[in-house]
Image: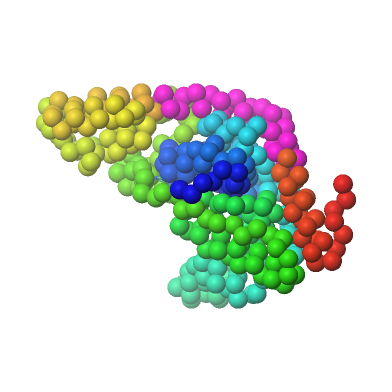
Amino acid sequence: MADQKGKTILTGVKPTGAPHIGNYIGAIRPALRLAASHEKSYLFIADYHALNAVYDPKALKEDSYQVAACWLALGLDPAKTVLYRQSDIPEIPELVTILSAVTPKGLMDRSHAYKAAKDRNAEENRDPDADVNMGLYTYPLLMAADILIANTDIVPVGKDQVQHIEFARDMAGYFNGAFKKNVLKLPEYQLEAGGALLPGIDGRKMSKSYGNHIPVFIDSAARRKLVMKTVTDSKLPAEPKNPDENVIFQIYTHVGTPEEVQAMRDAFEKGGMGYGDAKQKLFEALERNFEQPTAKYNELMADRKKLDDILEEGAARARKVTRETLSNVREAIGLARLRN
Ligand code: ADP
Ligand code: TRP
């Protein structure tokens, strides 16, 4: 990896409810590691993005708190990583308005998310724009504003988000070209190393939509119950088993120490490791990883004032940068800089 010292890294998280351990291993843990290894890191709750699909004030509020509590409980250091709500940064929607003046409509038409919605409608013989609101249509504009307003160098993304970063680069280029000034920094994406897909307790990919997930924040009894329900075949303890075909072992590889994982692999291959034993070891490793974060999460969710304070402080810190960027943008187009 190229030297990333001094670079700004930014991630947005849609508030979509409590995470499972697949989300943690596949998305949250890598993002926390990246944030810790960069001088400047921003993590925000993309509540305006969620609004396109959720018209439920209680859920939006609750889910936003959950995201904040979740990342803090899992190790985000708010003194280092700036944690804020998108909706606390008024510079973002202002930049959306400005970017929309230099962005061709055709760019939005090419957005994967919009095209997917149109394809679904076509399959169902509905009007192509049925259930497509302007928030969905202009999703890439808002996302570009999130990124460009913070002077971001790097956005870690999964494959599905690459187009959004390319669009943000395009929009920064359109703006700089239109006003003949290098005001907006062109961000780069960094593809998250894919591949680490956790199976759920039924052996399919762990996913909320399959209901086969182990939530990160649950009490020990519930955690034990889910682990004990994990599918196995009917081999007897004494029989040798292939650990790579075994859901318990696959989950264990992500939460056990390297020595523990090797020991379980050896024991499965040699024979003598029963599934009951393996489940107990998996449960213990999960406890070690998630018992304390669960306590911290519950503590934070019971203290909204503390969460509000952290988010407000984050917004104040973020706005030092976002106000500067917006002032430069306003100046470039012939408007006054923001006052104080
Ligand atoms: P779900 O399928 O439970 O709805 P999402 O699609 O909301 O999960 O995924 C959120 C993030 O978590 C994504 O970055 C995704 O790559 C990661 N993720 C989801 N499921 C898994 C899994 N089983 N293993 C590893 N990472 C996962
Ligand atoms: N679109 C992202 C997702 O669905 C969330 C997001 C919003 C985001 N704004 C962002 C991610 C800016 C990175 C940078 O996951």
Q: Is residue 308 visible?
A: no
**207 lies above or below 137:** above
Closer to the camera, 65 or 82? 82
Name the spot of residue 108 as percent of width and height, x first: 60, 70
Q: Position of residue 173 (x, y in %)?
A: 64, 67
Q: Is residue 219 visible?
A: yes
Q: Does residue 259 belong to the magenta stretch?
A: no
Direction front: furthest residue: 3
Is 312 magenta? The answer is: yes
Judge by depth and name the residue closer to the eye, 16 or 83. Answer: 83
Q: Nearer the viewer, residue 132 or 23?
A: 23
Q: Residue at x 31, y 42 (%)?
A: 202
Region of the chain picked out in magenta, as a range: 287-316
Whether 149 is drawn above or below 274: the answer is below
Q: Nearer the viewer, residue 130 or 246?
A: 246
Q: Is residue 54 above or below residue 273?
A: below
User: What scheme was used to colour the molecule?
Assistant: rainbow
**Which residue is found at the position 21% from the left and 37% from the top?**
243
Compared across the picture, whether 62 is left or right of 230 comes to right
